[in-house]
Image (cartoon, coloured by chain):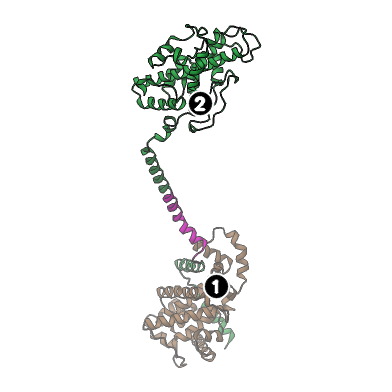
Chain colours: A green, B brown
């Protein structure tokens, strides 16, 4: 084979052979090669799948969440609100407490600070709060103010204070009520005793247990020691209306009875006077409570009156009830 | 080798690969891809095909850039129509892509590629009822004489063209299919006689005889023109 002739042929052929495949074929073949190289479960294909699966999943989760929230909201609207007000309506306050609930500290303190007006305000409270104690504390503090002239040897005397401060002291002197849900069988915080602090109220459980004892002890007090002016006329009137004569049956001295004790007395006489004062405060509270229950009945609030009466019975089981409340 | 020179002539270097990537839309920054392309331009076809078999798509781009023109012209010469050549061209490359996992570098890549093209041509011939003259190795069959019998290739028209290239192409088109195939394989892919034999599925002597007849006829036809 002649090499020069072959070279000439090759040169001529290359000079004439200039055809090229079209560009669309290049694109198609290169794309096919790239597709064939890319694995089936590659990241790119996974990203393509995820590009529509992620929004779908998010939309499904959102729709489920919204529907669940709507269902729960409807359930809450259908649920009666009795559970929220149940503790204040049914559960009685524990003995020895002042009847305040944790949910109403502001209202109670406000009502107490307003003195006599607070009684009406506290009647509106759902809790079975023994407002008479607050009133009694007010009156007792006023009564003690009259004893400021007593000698310094009496350690239980409180210093002179303005009216508002005295009211605040009365409020702070009220024993803390643990909770409105405390069972009635809770242990009593303190025993009854005349030597307890003056600011502490007399425990009601002790009073309820020994209401009859009060009646027994009362006659031992001097009738002369009780001044007719010292007993509020309303107290006596209400007691008579309930078929109960405080001057005779219980013979508990009025709050002003202690003032009848001559100044400068010491020892057993003084303790007797203190005990008499506490007993009179208890009686006032019971009578005030009964008046409140009666007022509630007259106002047509039978359920609240019944609840308060139940509480009253638990606190003063031996206290004679009037005919209208039996 | 002819194939290497042809590849450079067809733009099979790094620049042509980048141009192909730009066509395919796979390269965003040509400057970043230029350095690996220079390294890949020095790699053999077999290593590039092995790399593509292992998942390197850029190796295939390099291979395609090297062989796209030669293979296309080979198919165009053999079937005679651009549309058919394009279809066959695409089929050959797709067959190569599908068979990449089975590729093992036992021979030159060009041999492997043109073997696929040869088989595809055989399929085309069978479907199109085109019966290639497979054993038309008769030296008495003068293609130049047959060219003169064709109305479209009358000597006066050939004289009008007055170019040797056109004459050569005309002579090449008049060659028997097997002889033309052997000649174009040598010219386009740079295959040797043994490789042509391997690609066409014949023994080396048959391939050598086909190639010798083809060159002799072309040379004779050109001498007649001169």
In this picture, is B73 found above or below B132? above
In this picture, is A269 found above or below B107? above
* Prevailing secondary structure class for the magenta stretch in the rendered image: helix
Is residue A64 in sight in this rendering? yes
- Residue A41 covered by magenta stretch: yes
- Residue A201 covered by magenta stretch: no
Which residue is label 1 attached to? B53
Residue A125 location (% of width, % of height)? 43, 24
Task: Give the magenta part as a residue range.
Answer: A40-61
Label ID, residue A205: 2
Using the numbered discs, state the Cα–Cα distance from disc 1 to disc 2 in whole angstroms.
Answer: 98 Å
Residue A178 location (% of width, % of height)? 53, 30
Name the secondary structure under disc 2. Answer: helix
**Quarter of the figure that contains the N terminus of chain A:** bottom right
Nearer to the camera, B193 or B48: B48
Nearer to the camera, B179 or A277: A277
Name the secondary structure under disc 1. Answer: helix
């Amino acid at each position: 084979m002649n090499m020069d002739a072959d070279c000439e042929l090759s040169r001529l052929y290359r000079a004439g052979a200039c055809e090229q495949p079209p560009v669309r074929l290049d694109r198609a073949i290169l794309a096919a090669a790239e597709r064939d190289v890319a694995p089936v479960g590659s990241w790119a294909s996974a990203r393509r799948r995820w590009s529509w699966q992620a929004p779908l999943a998010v939309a499904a989760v959102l729709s489920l969440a919204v529907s669940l929230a709507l269902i729960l909201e409807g359930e809450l609207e259908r649920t009666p609100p009795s559970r929220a007000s149940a503790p204040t309506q049914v559960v009685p306050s524990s003995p020895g407490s002042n009847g305040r609930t944790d949910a109403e500290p502001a209202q109670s303190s406000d009502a107490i600070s307003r003195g006599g007006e607070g009684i009406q305000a506290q009647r509106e409270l759902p809790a079975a709060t023994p407002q008479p104690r607050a009133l009694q504390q007010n009156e007792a503090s006023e009564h003690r103010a009259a004893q400021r002239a007593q000698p310094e040897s009496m350690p239980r005397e409180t210093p002179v204070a303005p009216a508002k401060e005295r009211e605040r002291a009365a409020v702070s002197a009220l024993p803390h009520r643990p909770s409105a849900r405390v069972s009635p069988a809770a242990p009593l915080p303190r025993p009854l005793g005349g030597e307890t602090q003056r600011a502490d109220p007399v425990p009601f459980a002790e009073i309820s247990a020994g209401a009859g004892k009060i009646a027994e002890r009362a006659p031992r007090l001097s009738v002369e020691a009780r001044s007719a002016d010292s007993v509020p006329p309303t107290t006596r009137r209400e007691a008579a209306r309930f078929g109960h004569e405080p001057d005779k049956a219980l013979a508990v001295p009025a709050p002003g009875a202690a003032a009848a004790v001559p100044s400068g007395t010491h020892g057993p006489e003084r303790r007797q006077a203190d005990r008499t004062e506490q007993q009179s405060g208890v009686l006032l509270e019971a009578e005030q409570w009964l008046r409140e229950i009666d007022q509630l009945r007259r106002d047509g609030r039978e359920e609240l009156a019944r609840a308060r009466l139940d509480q009253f019975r638990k606190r003063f089981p031996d206290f004679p009830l009037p005919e209208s409340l039996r | 080798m002819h194939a290497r020179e042809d590849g450079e002539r067809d733009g099979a270097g790094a620049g042509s690969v980048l141009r192909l990537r730009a066509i395919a839309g796979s390269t965003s920054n040509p400057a970043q891809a230029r350095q690996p392309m220079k390294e890949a331009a020095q790699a053999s076809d077999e290593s590039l095909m092995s790399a593509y078999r292992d998942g390197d798509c850029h190796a295939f781009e390099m291979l395609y850039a090297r062989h796209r023109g030669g293979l296309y012209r080979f198919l165009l010469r053999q079937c005679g129509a651009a549309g058919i050549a394009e279809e066959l061209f695409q089929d050959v490359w797709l067959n190569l892509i599908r068979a990449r996992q089975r590729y093992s570098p036992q021979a030159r890549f060009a041999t492997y590629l043109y073997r696929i093209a040869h088989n595809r041509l055989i399929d085309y011939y069978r479907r199109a009822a085109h019966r290639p003259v497979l054993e038309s190795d008769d030296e008495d069959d003068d293609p130049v004489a047959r060219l003169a019998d064709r109305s479209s290739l009358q000597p006066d028209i050939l004289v009008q063209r007055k170019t040797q290239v056109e004459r050569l192409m005309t002579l090449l088109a008049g060659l028997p299919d097997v002889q033309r195939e052997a000649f174009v394989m040598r010219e386009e892919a740079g295959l040797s006689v043994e490789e042509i034999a391997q690609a066409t599925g014949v023994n080396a002597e048959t391939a050598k005889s086909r190639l010798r007849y083809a060159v002799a006829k072309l040379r004779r036809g050109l001498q007649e023109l001169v």
